[in-house]
Amino acid sequence: MEVYTSDSSDTDSRDQKTLDFGRMSLDLITLEDHLSSPQKGLLKASGDIETMLLNHNRLVGLPRLLQQFANLKVLDLSSNAITSLPDAVCQLPLVTLIAKNNLLTNGSLPKSLLSKLAGGSTLKELNLSGNQLTHFPEQVTELRQLKYLYVGGNKISSISKDIWKMQSLHVLSLGGNLISEVPEAVGSLSQLQALVLCDNLIEILPTSIARLKNLKSLLLHKNRLRHLPKDIVALKNLTELSLRDNPLVVRFVQDMALKPPTLLELAGRIVKASGQRPGPYDIPRTLAEYLNSANCCVNPNCKGVFFDNRVEHIKFVDFCGKYRVPLLQYLCSSKCIEPELPARGSVTASASTTNASSGFMMRKVLLG
């Protein structure tokens, strides 16, 4: 057990004290003994403790002496075997409550998460991921100051239609559940910057998603999406978009399957590559027009051309499972694929392109 002082820049004149009981294999009785021990004098200093770490122990509940720590701001209960959160938790002025990876159910949560001492909502971060919740906990919609909500890795089948009340939310993490539908109300979260909906059963997104003007990260991988709202191209701040393992991406990749060029195209490529320029009477006019329709490969290291048969190459850049939508390239051969190809003759989604071309590129990639 350690007691140390935080040097965080947002502490007040009284040093923020942290009580660390993490990773000590404590059960509830042993923890109670530590807290009540006269030798340690923790109860006498309880008013100075603002952070308590009880993570990675063998707790099945919370110590009854917890309410003695009247100024507790941060409580970490993660990775225990806790089966219920008592109402006493709501008597503390908590700003951060982390209870991920426990055995909590909807019925074992307090009916209200509002701080009774503070006279309202003080929580700004709540993490209930990795528990046994079967539906969205309606209590959290009372938390009007909440900025970060993590309820991934449960068995939640739907999102509360009252989620619009949580106007302070910056991060909403619902990945790894059983959600099949996203309510229109999600589009009312005007401050939302990250929306995590990956690994669910979602088949369609509401058009209201396009109203999330501050959204930077949208994680949708491992769902059942077949298309996205076309208005999603209006999300100017969106920098991370994860779509892998959805039918729309699988279908799009299948559509890009290489088809063998015709004999006419192969002959035309050979003629263009040779540098010869047939005279007006050397070949029929239709063939001359065909040769003039050749497109240069965008790869600057390739001298090849293509006519009707081109390789459409979509490059998804992987950042630890998060995908960006970068570049649609038209190449003469799959061998021409190189990293960081210039965008000459292609449609990109970079900041240097016009809004029109960016929107077109996004529609091509997202809608297939």
Image (cartoon, grey):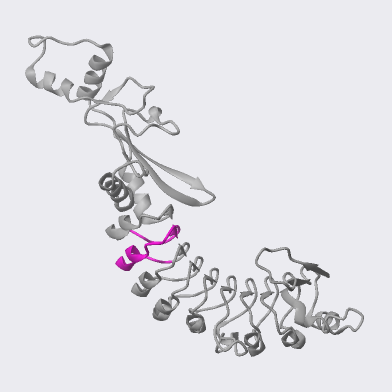
Q: Residue at x 42, y 79 (%)?
A: 165
Q: On the rendered structure, is 69 left or right of 291? A: right
Question: Which region shows up in magenta?
Answer: 201-227
Residue 288 in sight in this render: yes
> Is 282 situated above or below 365?
above
Q: Residue furthest front?
A: 13
* Quarter of the rendering occupied by the N terminus: bottom right
Instruction: Answer with the quarter of the image where residue 36 lies.
Output: bottom right
**Most common SS among magenta residues:** loop
Residue 204 in sight in this render: no
Q: Residue at x 56, y 74 (%)?
A: 124
**Image spot of residue 82 (x, y percent):** 68, 79
**Image spot of residue 162 (x, y percent):** 41, 81
> Is 154 situated above or below 268?
below
**Image spot of residue 75 (x, y percent):** 68, 75
How many discs appear?
Answer: 0
Magenta span includes 18 = no
Which one is nearer the viewer's eye here, 295 or 269? 295
Q: Residue at x 7, y 18 (%)?
A: 285
Magenta span includes 216 = yes
Q: Residue at x 52, y 48 (%)?
A: 319
Which one is nearer the viewer's eye here, 130 or 164? 164
> Is 2 situated above or below 338?
below
**Image spot of residue 220 (x, y percent):** 43, 59
Q: Residue furthest right?
A: 39
